[in-house]
Image: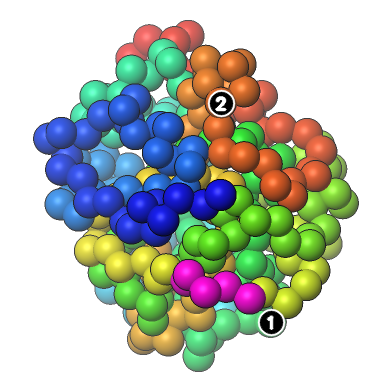
Amino acid sequence: MYNQKNLNVVKLNFENFSLSTLRDNLYTGSLFQIEKKIFCPLIMSLKQALQTYLVTEPEFAEHKLSPAQHFLQISKLRQELYSSPTWKKNTFEFFQSLKLPLDEYWIDTPRIRAIVTTKNQSPLAKPAYYIHRDTWYGNSQSQINFWIPLCDISRENGFCFYLDYFDKPIKNNSHLFNYEIWKASGGYQSTNINKFFPTIQEELKSHKIYHVNLPSEGVLIFSSAHLHATNPNTTDKTRFSIDIRIVHKKDFHDKLGAINVDNFSVGLNIQDMWDFSKENF
Ligand SMILES: [Fe+2]
């Protein structure tokens, strides 16, 4: 059964950070956060790119550009960063600063998210608010997510976890998700609106909802198997964030990870992750 101690968010010191000692706790549902700003070259390059593509005060650009222009500029920004060798090097340096033994993990390309305010929210963005587990998208049960926002996060602009569903199944349509088809239709951040987004298929009755509360440039660390959803952004600023997904190779091979209670997706994203043991920086 779900361990009550896991309902707490554990605050970490950057200096004492050791993911190897935390993995078992992450796999049983604990959430960890580092509140102190940490060295994150990814954030620095994202800030620079935001200045280039959205000009000054990028968090207010959604009020000055048309929704289509805003979307296009962010798509261009993503393209530039994801295709740059610096983005990969910055990822390497971020985990190096956390003293993570990089050769033990597969690491996915860090993804940029932009959640505009409810005032400018497009009906096409509806799937971004679906209640889901990341594992329903062909993500491993051993996967751990790092999430870093560029602004202070509260329930007005953040996301929430349904903690009591960590090890409790909920009816969903993940059986219709196929990772290869997903990739062929553009992957995680394409503009293709015909992609299939798995979500719940019954009414949610959660009694343990945790709304993320995190200072700007802090880090939230959680299992990809958590049931969660993005909150509508009721502030006046766009919420930018970076998320990075990692999988411990040995844990994956030893089938260590979060319990699979209801994930029926087909395929696995690990094949597309970086393996830094084969890189030289
Ligand atoms: Fe998610």
Q: In which quarter of the image is the C terminus?
A: top left
Q: Residues within 10 Å of mark 1 (few under 14, many from 20)?
A: few
**Residue identifier under label 2:** 256
Where is residue 269 shown, x and y percent of the image? Answer: 66, 33
Q: Which residue shows up at 42% across the image and 32% down it?
A: 24
Where is residue 12 shown, x and y percent of the image? Answer: 21, 45
Element type at marker 2?
A: loop
Left or right for 249, reference 190: left
Where is residue 227 shown, x and y percent of the image? Answer: 58, 59
Q: Nearer the viewer, residue 112 or 30?
A: 30
Callout 1 amino acid: Pro
Check the image and report above or below for 171 versus 3.
below
| Marks 1,2: beta carbons within 8 A | no
Where is residue 228 shown, x and y percent of the image? Answer: 55, 62
Chain part drawn in magenta: 205-209
**Residue identifier under label 1:** 123
> Viewer-nearest of labels 1 and 2?
2
Check the image and report above or below for 48 versus 281.
below
Can you tell me whether the CB of the residue at mark 1 lies under 8 Å from the nearest atom of ligand 1? no
Callout 2 amino acid: Leu
Among numbered discs 1 and 2, the one appearing first in the sequence: 1
Q: Nearer the viewer, residue 137 or 46?
A: 137
Residue 133, can we see it? yes
Residue 54, can we see it? no
Q: Nearer the viewer, residue 208 or 178?
A: 208
Q: Which residue shows up at 38% across the image and 10% down it?
A: 280
Left or right for 37, reference 139: left
Check the image and report above or below for 106 versus 47.
above
